Image: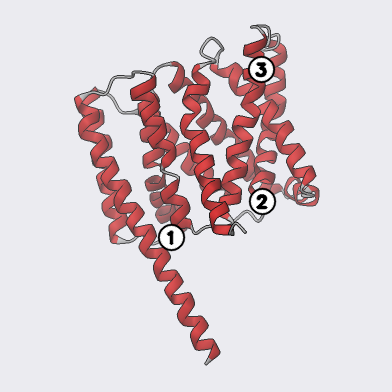
Amino acid sequence: MISDKAVGVAAILGCSTVWGLSPLFYDLLNAVSAWDILAHRTLWASILFGLVVWAQGHGGTLRRLIADRRSLGLLAVAAAMISLNWLVFILSVQLGHVVEASLGYYIFPLVTVLIGRFLFGDRPTAVQWIAVALATLGVSVLAAGLGAAPWVSLTLAISFGIYGALKRGLDAPAQVTVLVEVLCLLPIALAWIGWRGGAGLDGGTVQAALLFATGPMTALPLILFSMAARRITSATLGILSYLNPTLQFLCGVIWLAEPFTRAHAWAFPLIWAAVALYSVSLWRASNAARSAARAASASSTT
């Protein structure tokens, strides 16, 4: 019998692998406009998530979210943030900035530390503040070396951080909230595809199949992530999720042969050190929470 924890670990590894290798997929669509890809991704993801929500019997939750003006407003803004994130990522593949994109997903958790502190009153640990400082130094070194701010990295990290903050506290399964988001974007996507005369569907059977596949490429990792989040601790989830930017980094350097300059060579070790410290802080917090829970359980039985 496979344990829930093993299923959760397999799910987050599968999710991170799909996300991490996605540059290779979107590189196959280099002949298609990033805006066309985004429109198709929205259309086919909405169909898939609609089927998943219907199959799981979450229709009531979907109707409740749509009827609640506050939740719908938050998810509409979240939809704008995630569409920006998707667009910038696709453009990073098409323009040869996958290494910079991977940096964005490395520093994203550290951006959430700042968002949590200043928007929600969270109290980061000293180790987490050191991790944020190291990441800031790494980004500054890269900016100085390249002569410009790493806008791809910053846009991906900040947009995804805001996206997560907007969804914080929403009492609904991830697949339902994502369905509401893509439904908010669907009218725009359909109008775009119609205006563009199919938006790439006339580029041959293979290209059309790849555009259809943007739906599963969007839906599958999010479903796997949701499965993992219910079965493993946030520390394990966070640490194993770093497989995603690591694979993106390797895709950029090895497969797509992007330049890795001296500035990158100085900046990335600083970022990796920040990631290591942040992972240690997550692990310590998780262990402390488990110890407290065991102590509380023991005292309640005596």
Task: Give the answer, above or below, for where 300 lies relative to 182.
Answer: below
Which of the two labelled residues, at mark 3 and mark 2, occupies the earlier sequence position? 2
Element under disc 2: loop
Q: Earlier in the sequence, mark 1 or mark 2?
A: 1
Q: How far apart, in angstroms, are the residues tagged by discs 3 and 2?
A: 29 Å
- Secondary element type, mark 1: loop
Q: Which residue type does callout 3 highlight?
A: Ala
- Residue 210: x, y in percent? 62, 19
Q: Is residue 224 above or below residue 203?
A: below
**Residue 154 seen in render:** no
Residue 173, numbered label: 2
Q: Residues within 10 Å of mark 1 (few under 14, many from 20)?
A: few
Question: What amino acid is at disc 2?
Answer: Pro
Q: Point out the frontmost of discs 1 and 3.
A: 3
Q: Can you give x and y, in whole percent of width and height, for residue 285 in the image?
A: 39, 64
Q: Quadrant of residue 1?
A: bottom right
Q: Nearer the viewer, residue 219 or 1?
A: 1
Residue nearest the viewer, comparing 100 with 72: 100
Q: Give the SS element for disc 3.
A: helix
10 sits left or right of 261 in the view: right
Which residue is under mark 1? 121
Tell me which residue sits at (61%, 50%) in the image: 227
Query: Residue at 53% across / 29% down in the picture?
Result: 86
Query: Which marked residue is nearer to the observer: mark 1 or mark 2?
Result: 2
